[in-house]
């Protein structure tokens, strides 16, 4: 009952060309705040410090300590891109970030949580939470991190690749299930 | 076939190509009746279905503006997406999860069985059960439903093994991999299920029945079908005699077209069907078409739903395998001692990671939220599919403040849960939690009420024309050549996922239309 996939950071960087642009751009906003990045985000709507706050918000709303900053950076990029094309979104986010203040990104997690709690019912928070949840868990690096194996059509489905490999519970009697349609 | 002329008034015009409209189109065309099938969406195929969940959602879903109101949880958790159905050739049969149980005899006698319940608009179905059963059997053969007619069940997935073990611990007896319109072996010119877990993104195997690659190409092969994609119906017109005679629609270029019609069948999913009837108001029918009773759009049902997720100390990999292939049916009974009337099914559910995070858990954030996602691998899932009670004010109306691309008012969906729905949901979520606890769950998490995927009863069949919109054949009480051919016509929701019933009623309606046409009645 083993996970079927592995994907390391190097694979992801190769696979993600086109998702994140401007590889290794010293001094770009996210390069400065992320540890040892080999990537960066082109910002079109936000300033460096706004992006740093956005990254911190993302890490506070969905805190997975060992999930690579790359996955979080994709959220910043998707948000930046939407803000670029939609003035209302841009203003809502800029205002929300301003409300949280410049010290937010560097403050301890408890303080960040408390600050976000205060604005939980705001349009800004609702928007950014949804954007984070919809984007963070949709990237190949998140799939790999959480062990989600994704589409399987290209590999012949899960029929012969573990869809029924659970062994810690009794097997289902044939009359309540059905046969495997091919011989393994 | 050559296209049917816009001025040809001998054709039957069907609006919508899903379970109801697509099946009806096949049934009429194979009888030699020419059909214009209007579909608002584009045509995809097993080749073009996206395997990226977010892209697939955008590719298949009806995303035109809608508004909602009322106290149901969906208004809070999914303010911009009250309902989740498709806009594509094949309609919602492209993304459905293919569960095909039957309604039970007592569910058709809803008013008689449940009595006079305050705050409901219950009525009995105008169809005897034996009559519906005859068409269920035809529909089950058509859809090659598992565990019927000697068709084997689907094999048990990991997620189902968890459900099964928990259900048995609680003493449930009717637990199996479900009656599913998914090929458990190759049949009907289609392959068998390879357990991809991507039912909702469109089945790239074609193992799951969809009108997209069954009924519609067969209708096309008769030479009697004129399928027009990206053609959004905006109005049904009538003559001075009160009979409908044309459908206005916008084509792919946004140009208005008028297709003459001998008969019009509306199958746009319960929201759009009601909206189209309301949009078609005229000086003769100021409340909208087929609406002398005032019932169009009312009695909207969507099933009592809600998730429960169970987390274990070992992996489940619940995304591997057919999304919904498992059910506990013991609670499909009417036992008011449970604190509510009507029954519910507990159905298996696996969601891909991004959909789980955004639809399965639409609230919460921070460490606790993250810890749930961290345990995604070890998660099993189920949801409730229970009867919700019709209420007169749970209804589709036109919202003049929000317009679609053609400047027409969008649909507003108003739902207030009945206390019965709340009691049923509470009971069901408690039973599902007990099932997981009984086999050692480390944690259980109740999920929200998701956007409604089962939309029903907004133009319901009724014996008395004052109670509903159509007769027992989906023929409108007011206008003899106007039919309702989708889930809108269901009288009540019962506890059965609606597609099998929609298909059965479409098969029955086709027989009726042929017979009435021959007899010169329509």
Image (spheres, rainbow, N blue to C red):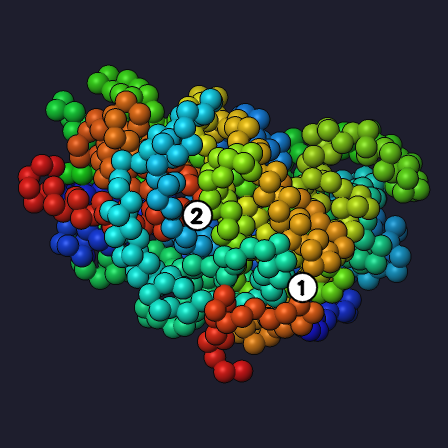
To which residue does mark 1 refer? B316
Crowdedness near tag 1: few (<14), some (14–19) or many (≥20) residues, C-alpha within 10 Å: many
Q: Chain of mark 2?
A: B
Residue A166's place in the image compared with A74, above or below, is below
Residue B240: % across, % down: 14, 22
Which corner quadrant of the image does residue B73 belong to? top right
Residue at 16% in and 44% down: B513
Q: Is residue B300 left or right of residue A38?
A: left
To which residue does mark 2 refer? B497
Front-lying residue, B144 or A158: B144
Q: How many marks?
A: 2
Q: Is residue B44 left or right of residue B448?
A: left
Dot 2 and dot 1 within a common chain: yes
Residue B102's place in the image compared with B266, above or below, is below
Q: Chain of mark 1?
A: B
Residue at 45% in and 67% down: B153
Helix, strand or loop under label 1: loop
Which corner quadrant of the image does residue A26 belong to? bottom right
Residue B46: % across, % down: 43, 63
């Amino acid at each position: 009952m083993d996970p079927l996939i592995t994907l390391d950071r190097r694979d992801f960087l190769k696979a993600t060309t086109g998702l994140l642009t401007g590889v290794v751009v010293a001094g770009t906003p996210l390069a400065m705040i992320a540890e040892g990045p080999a990537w960066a985000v082109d910002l079109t709507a936000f300033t460096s410090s706004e992006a740093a706050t956005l990254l911190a918000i993302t890490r506070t709303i969905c805190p997975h300590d060992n999930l690579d900053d790359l996955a979080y950076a994709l959220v910043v990029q998707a948000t930046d891109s939407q803000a670029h094309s939609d003035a209302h979104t841009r203003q809502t986010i800029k205002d929300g970030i301003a409300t949280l203040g410049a010290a937010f990104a560097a403050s301890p997690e408890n303080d960040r949580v408390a600050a976000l709690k205060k604005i939980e019912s705001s349009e800004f928070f609702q928007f950014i939470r949804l954007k984070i949840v919809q984007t963070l868990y949709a990237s190949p690096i998140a799939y790999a991190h959480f062990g989600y194996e994704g589409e399987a059509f290209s590999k012949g489905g899960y029929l012969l690749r573990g869809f029924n490999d659970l062994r810690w519970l009794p097997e289902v009697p044939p009359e309540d299930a059905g046969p495997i349609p091919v011989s393994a | 076939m050559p296209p049917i002329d816009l001025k040809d008034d001998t054709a039957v015009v069907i609006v919508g190509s899903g379970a109801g409209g697509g099946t009806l189109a096949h049934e009429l065309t194979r009888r030699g009746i020419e059909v214009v099938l209007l579909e608002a969406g584009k045509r995809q195929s097993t080749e073009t279905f996206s395997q990226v969940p977010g892209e697939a959602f955008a590719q298949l879903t009806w995303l035109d503006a809608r508004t909602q109101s009322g106290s149901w949880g969906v208004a809070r958790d999914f303010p911009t997406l009250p309902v989740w159905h498709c806009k594509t050739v094949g309609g919602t049969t492209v993304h459905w999860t293919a569960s095909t149980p039957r309604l039970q005899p007592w569910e058709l006698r809803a008013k008689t069985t449940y009595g006079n319940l305050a705050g409901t608009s219950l009525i009995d179905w105008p169809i005897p059960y034996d009559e519906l059963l005859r068409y269920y059997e035809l529909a089950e053969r058509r859809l090659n439903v598992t565990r019927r007619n000697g068709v084997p069940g689907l094999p048990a997935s990991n997620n189902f093994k968890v459900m099964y073990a928990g259900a048995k611990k609680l003493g449930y007896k009717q637990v199996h991999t479900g009656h599913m319109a998914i090929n458990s072996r190759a049949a009907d010119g289609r392959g068998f299920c390879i357990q991809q877990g991507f039912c909702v993104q469109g089945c790239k195997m074609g193992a799951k029945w969809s009108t997209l690659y069954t009924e519609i190409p067969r209708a096309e092969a008769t030479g009697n079908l004129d399928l027009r994609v990206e053609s959004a119906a905006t109005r049904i017109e009538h003559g001075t005699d009160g009979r409908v005679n044309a459908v206005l629609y916008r084509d792919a270029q946004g140009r208005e077209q008028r297709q003459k019609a001998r008969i019009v069948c509306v199958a746009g999913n319960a929201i759009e069907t009601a909206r189209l009837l309301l949009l078609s108001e005229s000086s003769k029918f100021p409340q909208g078409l087929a609406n002398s009773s005032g019932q169009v759009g009312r009695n909207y049902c969507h099933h009592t739903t809600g998730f429960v997720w169970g987390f274990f100390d070992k992996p489940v990999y619940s995304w591997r395998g057919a999304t919904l292939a498992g059910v506990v049916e013991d609670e499909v009974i009417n036992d008011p001692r449970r604190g509510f009337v009507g029954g519910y099914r507990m159905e298996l559910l696996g969601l891909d990671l991004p959909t789980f995070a955004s639809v399965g858990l639409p609230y919460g954030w921070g460490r606790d939220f993250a810890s749930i996602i961290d345990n995604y691998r070890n998660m099993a899932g189920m949801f409730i599919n229970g009867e919700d009670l019709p209420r007169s004010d749970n209804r589709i109306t036109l919202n003049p403040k929000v317009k679609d691309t053609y400047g027409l008012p969008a649909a507003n969906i108003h739902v207030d849960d009945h206390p019965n729905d709340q009691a049923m949901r509470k009971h069901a979520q408690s039973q599902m939690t007990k099932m997981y606890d009984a086999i050692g769950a480390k944690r259980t998490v109740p999920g929200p009420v998701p956007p409604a995927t089962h939309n029903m009863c907004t133009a319901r069949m009724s014996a008395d024309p004052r109670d509903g919109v159509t007769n027992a054949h989906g023929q409108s009480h007011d206008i003899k050549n106007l039919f309702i051919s989708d889930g809108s016509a269901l009288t009540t929701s019962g506890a059965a996922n609606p597609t099998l019933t929609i298909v059965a009623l479409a098969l029955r309606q086709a027989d009726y239309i042929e017979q009435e046409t021959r007899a010169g009645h329509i």
